[in-house]
C-alpha cells in the first residue's frame, strides 16, 4: 500500500471515530435516559414497564404535552416563557370554579350554576391566549427579553391566582366537588388496556385530546405561513423582516398560541387533579422547557420539531415516574430536573458551536 493510500485510510478512520463520537455526544441524554429506564426496570421495580404503569406514563405525558408544545414556539424565537406554570394554575382554578356541582357546600360561585363544558374551554383558552399576547406585545414592542417579561407576568399571575381562590364562597380553600360533566369529559374513557388477570386500565380521554392537539400543532408549524414565519424569525430576525415577515404580529401570535395551550393544559389539570389550589401548575414551565430542549428545540432559535417535543416529554415522564417507583426522594428529583436542563442546554450549545 502506498503512503498516500495509508494516509487516506488513516484519515477515514479518524473521521469515522469523530463521527461516532459526535453522534454519541449529541444523543448522550437519550442514551443515559434509556439506561436509567433499563436500570429501574430490572434493579429497582419490575412493574415499571407493566401495562398499568405504561398507561400512567402515557397519561402524564398527555397532561404535560400541550404546555410543552406551547412553550416550544417561544424557544424557537430564542426566548422562553416563565409564566406558563402560573397561567396553567390560574386557568385550572377558573375551570374548576365554573364547573363545580350545583348545591355543593364548597361551591365557589353560589349564584351561578354549572356552565357548559365548551363554554368554559373557550373562556380559559381565551384567557391563556390573552396572557400570551400580553407577553408577546412587550417582547415585540419594547424589545425586552422574554425571560424578563414572562418573569414579571409570572408574579402578576400568581398574585391574581392567590386573590382568585379567596373570592366567592371559597375563602382560599381547595376548589373541588367538580361536576361529573367535567370530570367525565377529561378523565372518562372508552378504551382500556388489558393488564392481566381479567383486569384492564382505562386510557383517559385527555390522552386523545393531546394527540389531536399535537397533530394540530404539527400542521401549524409545518404547513402554514405562520409556522414558516416563526422559524424564519427565530433563525434571523433582520433577514425575516427584510423578507416581508411581520415581526410584531408573528411574535404576538407565537406567544398567544403558547398561552392558549397553557389554558387548555389548565382545563385538563383542573379535572385531572380534582382539588385545585394556588400551587396548581407550580414549576410546569420547568418540565416543559426541559422536554423541549431534550427534544431538540434549540435556544439558538429557528430549530425544533414536534416529534422531538413529544419524545422529550415522554422521556421526562419515564424518568420521573421511574424515580418515584424507585422510591427516590422528591428533593432529589428536583436535582435531576435541574441537571437535565443544564446538560441538555450544554449539548444544544455544543451542536451550535460545531456548526458555526
Image (tube, rainbow, N blue to C red):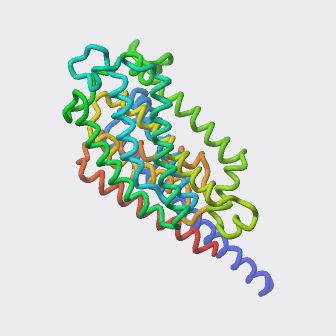
- At a point 44% along the width and 32% down the height, the residue shown is 59
Quadrant (top left, top right, bottom left, bottom right) of the C terminus: bottom right
Tell me how many marks there are. Answer: 0
- At a point 41% along the width and 55% down the height, the residue shown is 82
Q: Position of residue 182 (x, y in %)?
A: 40, 21
Q: Position of residue 40 (x, y in %)?
A: 35, 44
- At a point 66% along the width and 43% down the height, the residue shown is 220
54 relative to 200, above or below:
below
220 sits to left or right of 149: right
264 sits to left or right of 16: left
Q: Position of residue 67 (x, y in %)?
A: 47, 44
Query: In which image quadrant can residue 115 be found?
Result: top left
177 relative to 280, above or below:
above
Query: In which image quadrant can residue 194 be found?
Result: top left
- At a point 67% along the width and 50% down the height, the residue shown is 227
270 relative to 136, above or below:
above
Does the image show residue 42?
no
Amino acid at each position: 500500500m502506498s503512503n498516500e493510500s495509508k494516509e487516506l485510510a488513516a484519515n477515514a478512520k479518524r473521521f469515522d471515530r469523530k463521527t461516532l463520537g459526535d453522534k454519541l455526544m449529541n444523543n448522550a441524554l437519550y442514551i443515559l435516559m434509556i439506561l436509567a429506564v433499563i436500570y429501574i426496570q430490572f434493579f429497582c421495580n419490575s412493574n415499571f414497564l407493566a401495562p398499568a404503569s405504561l398507561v400512567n406514563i402515557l397519561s402524564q405525558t398527555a397532561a404535560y404535552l400541550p404546555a410543552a408544545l406551547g412553550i416550544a414556539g417561544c424557544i424557537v424565537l430564542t426566548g422562553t416563557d416563565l409564566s406558563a406554570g402560573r397561567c396553567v394554575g390560574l386557568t385550572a382554578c377558573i375551570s374548576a370554579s365554573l364547573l363545580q356541582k350545583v348545591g355543593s357546600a364548597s361551591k365557589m360561585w353560589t349564584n351561578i350554576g354549572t356552565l357548559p363544558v365548551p363554554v368554559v374551554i373557550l373562556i380559559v383558552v381565551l384567557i391563556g391566549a390573552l396572557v400570551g399576547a400580553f407577553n408577546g406585545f412587550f417582547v415585540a414592542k419594547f424589545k425586552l427579553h422574554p425571560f424578563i417579561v414572562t418573569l414579571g407576568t409570572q408574579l402578576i399571575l400568581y398574585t391574581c391566582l392567590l386573590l382568585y381562590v379567596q373570592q366567592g364562597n371559597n375563602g382560599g380553600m381547595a376548589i373541588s366537588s367538580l361536576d361529573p360533566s367535567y370530570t367525565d369529559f377529561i378523565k372518562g374513557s372508552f378504551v382500556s388496556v388489558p393488564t392481566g388477570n381479567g383486569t384492564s386500565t382505562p386510557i383517559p380521554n385527555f390522552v386523545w385530546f393531546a394527540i389531536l392537539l399535537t397533530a394540530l400543532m404539527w400542521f401549524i408549524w409545518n404547513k402554514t405561513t405562520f409556522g414558516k414565519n416563526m422559524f424564519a424569525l427565530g433563525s434571523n430576525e433582520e433577514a425575516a423582516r427584510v423578507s416581508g415577515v411581520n415581526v410584531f404580529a408573528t411574535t404576538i401570535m407565537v406567544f398567544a398560541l403558547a398561552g392558549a395551550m397553557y389554558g387548555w393544559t389548565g382545563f385538563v389539570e383542573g379535572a385531572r387533579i380534582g382539588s385545585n389550589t394556588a400551587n396548581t401548575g407550580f414549576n410546569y414551565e420547568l418540565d416543559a422547557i426541559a422536554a423541549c430542549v431534550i427534544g431538540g428545540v434549540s435556544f439558538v432559535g429557528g430549530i425544533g420539531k414536534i416529534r422531538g417535543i413529544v419524545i422529550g416529554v415522554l422521556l421526562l415522564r419515564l424518568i420521573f415516574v421511574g424515580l418515584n417507583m424507585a422510591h427516590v426522594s422528591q428533593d432529589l428529583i428536583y436535582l435531576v430536573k435541574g441537571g437535565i436542563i443544564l446538560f441538555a442546554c450544554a449539548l444544544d450549545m455544543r451542536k451550535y458551536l460545531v456548526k458555526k
